Amino acid sequence: GENVEQHPSTLSVQEGDSAVIKCTYSDSASNYFPWYKQELGKGPQLIIDIRSNVGEKKDQRIAVTLNKTAKHFSLHITETQPEDSAVYFCAASSTGNQFYFGTGTSLTVIP
Amino acid sequence: KAGVTQTPRYLIKTRGQQVTLSCSPISGHRSVSWYQQTPGQGLQFLFEYFSETQRNKGNFPGRFSGRQFSNSRSEMNVSTLELGDSALYLCASRTHPASYEQYFGPGTRLTVT
């Protein structure tokens, strides 16, 4: 099956700086790559996603890039704010199949 | 539109007991997946249901089972609980197994003592 690796496991940044989280996947059949944000005591929240026919997608301060050849995708958060502090998960899936998740990145934004 | 709801939110059980967790998907969503989340193993897929049929199943023992009702609500059951079953159990829904966006509920925190 699919194997998704995520790095780093923890990340601390100063407020206003950028944060980058990277994931790799193994199955070339995967064609959907969502990112989830999980705050303490809550379920994961879908924040952005990208499909394999697109190289980059942006939504305000959040962007995701995908390199199909290298089988890796990244989450970029610019102008970080304290409310961005949470655990972020990447995932990979192919149409109609289950989702495989990375192990999570705990992001701390220092005011 | 209401999100995915899960009941109960917290549960404490004793080893050997069984437990049933419930999930109501977003209105119009007919596919429901269950995940186990632990600090050591992360988010692990348990199973997915669509049209009252299990479509996919993760690598969990037969003590973990589920079902889906005609209104798309789903339940999962864990029998003969073990200490290692302590986890956050998350339910996620999407409109159809072939659709991409999947939305999670708040989870049920199960503690086995």
Image (spheres, coloured by chain):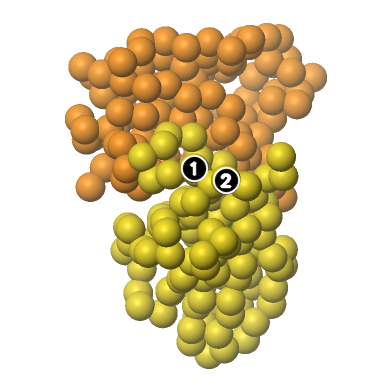
Q: Name the mark on residue B73.
A: none
Q: Secondary structure at mark 2?
A: loop
Read off the chain for label 2.
Answer: B
Q: Would residue A103 be seen by someone viewing this image from the given angle? A: yes
Query: Residue at label 2?
Result: B28
What residue is at 71 percent from the left and 40 percent from the top? B1
Residue B70 appears left or right of B65:
right
Residue B54 rendering spot, x and y as whole percentages: 36, 63
- The secondary structure type at the circle numbered 1 is loop
Q: Amino acid at mark 1?
A: Thr
The 10 Å Cα crowd at callout 2, few under 14, some 14 to 19, many 20 or more, is few
Q: Quadrant of residue B44?
A: bottom left
Which residue, as the protein is rendered here, is positioned at the far front?
Answer: B70
Q: Is residue A8 above or below residue B98?
A: above
Residue displayed at 65% across by 82% down: B13
- Assess whether mark 2 and mark 1 are in contact (beta carbons under 8 angstroms): yes
Task: Tell me the distance, in whole angstroms, between the alpha carbons under discs 1 and 2.
Answer: 6 Å
Residue indicated by mark 1: B95
- For the C terminus of chain A, the quadrant is top right
Which residue is at the front of the view, A5 or B62? B62
| Chain identity for the colour yellow used in the image | B
Evaluate whether label 1 is on the same chain as label 2. Answer: yes
Instruction: Answer yes or no: is residue B15 visible.
Output: no
Judge left or right: residue A80 versus residue B34.
Answer: right
The picture quadrant where one finds residue A3 is top left
Dot 1, crowdedness within 10 Å: few (<14), some or many (≥20)? some
Q: Residue B46 or A19: which is nearer the viewer?
A: B46
